Amino acid sequence: MKKYCIIFLIICSSYHLTAQGSMIRKYGFSVAMSNAFSFFQTDTRHASEAKIRFGMGGMFRFHLHPAPTLEIQLGLEVLSQSCKFSTYYFETGYSQFYDRNFRFEHQLRIWEMYIPIIGRFNLAGSGEMAPASFYLMGGYAPKFFLQATTEITDRETGKGVWGGGTDLRFENWFINEQLGNVLIAGMGLDKRLRFSEKFVSFELIYRYNLSRFWYVGRYNTNELLIKNSALTFQMGYRF
């Protein structure tokens, strides 16, 4: 695997030198950090409405330039999303009584990985040599759950009753239960740094998950289906 990565970087470096000689950019890279505003929708027959908590992420993308106004982007992104809601919690050995009194607050945090395939369309008048470029984006990404943790608090006493890892799986999964499908849409602005081929980028991206996921809590005591989407604001560096 390491050998193939080295060969890939050598090819890209050679191609970059050729492109610089002709003053036509054929490819590029970008990195960015983001803040996430996540939207979680629970079944209110089994839990209270979910409230947003702070989210964050980072990404690396490879850019191909098949035409002056079109880019194809391939990348790797990691995003952390979080929410809190009230629902049930049952200790091991105790009876389960679903009385619609959602006494326990669950704070769920998810770490997930995306492999996006994105088409970027520069608007008219936003060429490669322009000082700024405004564009629209659309694409698809498989999404994989890396890790999920829960902190459960008794709302009546304010005391924590349990905290730790929990399993998540998609209702309609792709390849395996931790892998789902996400649609991507967004817009962005590249601001050229002086007269170089480097840019500061600002992007607003919406991610829509095509499937709900199962939240099982501790030892499958919850079995709660949750719908998720996210709006991220990314600030990055493109080179």
Image (spheres, rainbow, N blue to C red):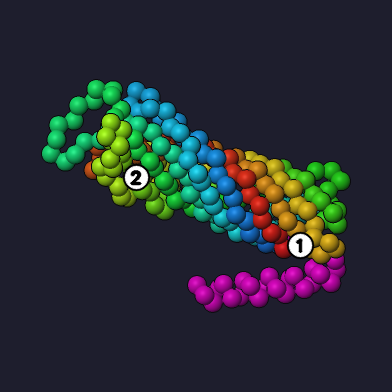
Q: Amino acid at mark 2?
A: Thr
Q: On screen, 203 above or below 44?
A: below
Q: Secondary structure at mark 2?
A: strand
Magenta span has 11?
Answer: yes
Image quarter where the C terminus lies is bottom right
Q: Which residue is mark 2?
A: 150
Q: Position of residue 76 (x, y in %)?
A: 55, 57
Q: Secondary structure at mark 1?
A: loop
Q: Which residues are magenta?
A: 1-27
Residue drawn 81% across the image and 51% down it: 132
Is 123 left or right of 11, judged from the image as shown? Answer: right
In the rendered image, residue 163, in percent from the top left (x then y), is placed at 30, 47
> Majority secondary structure of the magenta segment?
helix
Residue 198 is tagged as 1
- Measuring 80% from the left and 43% from the top, which residue is drawn there? 123
Q: Residue at the location (18% across, 30% down)?
A: 96
Question: CA gap, disc 2 to disc 1?
Answer: 41 Å
Which quarter of the figure has residue 197? bottom right
